[in-house]
Amino acid sequence: MSYVISSCAVLLFISALLIVYRTAKGPTALDRMVSVDMLTSIVIGGFALLAAATRRADLLPVFVAVSIIGFIGSTTLARFSAPLSGATRKALAQAAAERKTAKVQDSQVLETAAKEMMSRPENDLHMRQKYVDGFADRGERK
């Protein structure tokens, strides 16, 4: 049982780290709101894990309280957040398109570099192929 609880705790910790990264990186306030809502869910999962590990049933009110606070916080932020203006929406779309083209260009540069590297005679794979080809030319098998 302790292996299950330990692995669940590790998974909750890793997911919390990823959610904190998303909270810091989120381009809009709504993205950050969703990540904080997910972090609230992870905290509830941590309390549930604690309740399962210690076999304490008195943590149920904590689950309920944290759930209500998370729900009220999310709905309040969603209600009072301003919608994106047309200019902001266009700027975000343009930034996303630029990132996409940058990724395509980066992948093309990497592909070209890989082809160039493979064509170099000092490359290990190239040398192995020449070695195998040398045996094939003499009619020998390795």
Image (cartoon, rainbow, N blue to C red):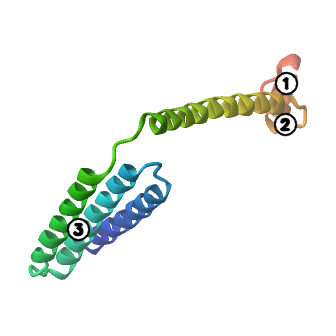
State the residue position of label 3.
44
Name the side, left or right, on which 118 lies relative to 83.
Answer: right
Q: Quadrant of the N terminus?
A: bottom left
Q: In this view, does 126 lie above or below 43?
A: above
Q: How crowded is mark 1: few (under 14 residues within 10 Å), some or many (20 or more)?
A: few
Mark 2 against mark 1, which lies toward the viewer? 2
* Label whose residue precedes the other's in the sequence (1 or 3): 3
State the residue position of label 2.
123
Image quadrant where residue 10 sits: bottom left
* Label whose residue precedes the other's in the sequence (2 or 3): 3
Q: Nearer the viewer, residue 142 or 69?
A: 69
Q: Which mark is residue 135?
A: 1
Q: Is residue 133 above or below residue 56?
A: above
Image quadrant where residue 3 sits: bottom left
Name the side, left or right, on which 85 lies relative to 74.
Answer: right
Q: In which quarter of the image is the C terminus?
A: top right
Amino acid type, callout 3: Ile
Q: Which of 6 and 36 is in front in this view?
A: 36
